[in-house]
Image (spheres, rainbow, N blue to C red):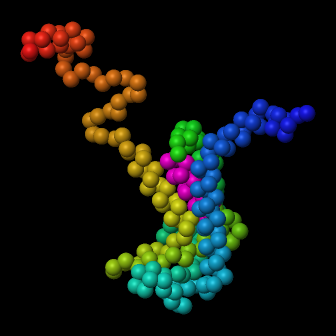
């Protein structure tokens, strides 16, 4: 009798193994996407549209953190607000690039799976808003001393945190005037003396010290 697993083709089995290899990515990706879409749905249902100036924001931590409900047709800080279609295409292109270049991006590494999971979940969250609503819902409003930070959402947070982590990771081995040591190679001797010569004379030095 043939089991269901045995009925899979070799290509299908490799595909399932590949998905398991990116389990961290998919977990973070789905968590960010679900949190983003659920929070936006709650805001649209409970916070009046246009809440930012009039009606005023809803305080969560008075003087620091508020809920608002504003529609953003552009990117961060409302840039390119007249180019919603172009921004949607850029988001789709970014997701496609992560998929096709996943090996070059070292997506098999756990840290980078978390990083790109946050970024891709955020990109898709805002992409869905642009596709189905024509704009992105921003609802997190942070007030700093003498500065009101532009409203943002969970997707924006995922993208920002992911990009920051990736930048830190990218520069982890960078040191002025130095190259990272290659794996599997011993470092050069501290002086011009060959290691074998040092090893051959060291017993004599130790015996003379006695």
Q: Position of residue 51 (x, y in %)?
A: 55, 85
* Quadrant into which the C terminus falls: top left
Give the camera-side residue of 16 and 176: 16
Q: Residue furthest right?
A: 1
Look at the image and say whether residue 60 sits in the magenta stretch: no
9 is higher (above) or lower (below) than 22:
above
Which quadrant of the structure image shows residue 15? top right
Give the camera-side residue of 109 and 44: 109
Q: Horizontally, is 188 left or right of 98 in the view?
A: left
Q: Horizontally, is 100 left or right of 168 in the view?
A: right
Q: Horizontally, is 156 left or right of 189 in the view?
A: right
Which quadrant of the structure image shows residue 142? bottom left
89 is higher (above) or lower (below) than 184:
below
Could you tell me which residue is drawn at 55 percent across and 43 percent down? 107
Q: Position of residue 52 (x, y in %)?
A: 52, 84
User: Is residue 75 something one can see in this rendering?
Assistant: no
Could you tell me which residue is drawn at 51 percent across and 52 percent down? 115
Could you tell me which residue is drawn at 51 percent across and 65 percent down? 157
* Quadrant into which the N terminus falls: top right
Q: Main secondary structure of the magenta part?
A: helix
Q: Residue furthest bottom?
A: 55
126 is higher (above) or lower (below) than 209:
below
Q: Residue furthest front?
A: 210
Give the camera-side residue of 37 and 49: 37
User: Is residue 19 something one can see in this rendering?
Assistant: yes
136 is higher (above) or lower (below) than 117:
below
Range of residues picked out in magenta: 111-126
Look at the image and say whether residue 122 sits in the magenta stretch: yes
Give the camera-side residue of 89 and 151: 151
Q: Position of residue 196 (x, y in %)?
A: 25, 11
Could you tell me which residue is drawn at 42 percent across and 50 percent down? 167
Q: Position of residue 2 (x, y in %)?
A: 88, 34
């Amino acid at each position: 009798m043939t089991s269901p697993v045995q009925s899979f083709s070799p290509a299908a089995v490799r595909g399932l193994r590949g998905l398991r290899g990116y389990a961290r990515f998919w977990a973070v990706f789905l968590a960010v996407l679900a949190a983003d879409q659920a929070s936006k749905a709650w805001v649209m249902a409970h916070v009046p549209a246009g809440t930012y100036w009039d009606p005023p924001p809803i305080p969560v931590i008075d003087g620091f953190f508020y809920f608002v409900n504003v529609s953003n047709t552009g990117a961060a800080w409302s840039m390119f607000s007249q180019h919603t279609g172009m921004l949607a295409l850029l988001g789709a292109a970014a997701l496609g690039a992560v998929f096709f270049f996943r090996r070059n991006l070292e997506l098999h590494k756990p840290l980078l799976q978390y990083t790109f999971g946050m970024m891709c979940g955020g990109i898709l969250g805002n992409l869905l808003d642009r596709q189905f609503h024509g704009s992105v819902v921003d609802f997190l409003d942070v007030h700093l001393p003498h500065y009101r930070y532009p409203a943002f959402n969970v997707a924006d947070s995922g993208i920002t945190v992911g990009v920051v982590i990736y930048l830190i990771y990218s520069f982890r081995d960078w040191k002025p005037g130095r190259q990272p040591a290659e794996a599997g190679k011993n470092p050069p001797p501290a002086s011009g003396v060959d290691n074998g010569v040092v090893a051959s004379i060291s017993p004599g030095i130790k015996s003379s010290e006695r």
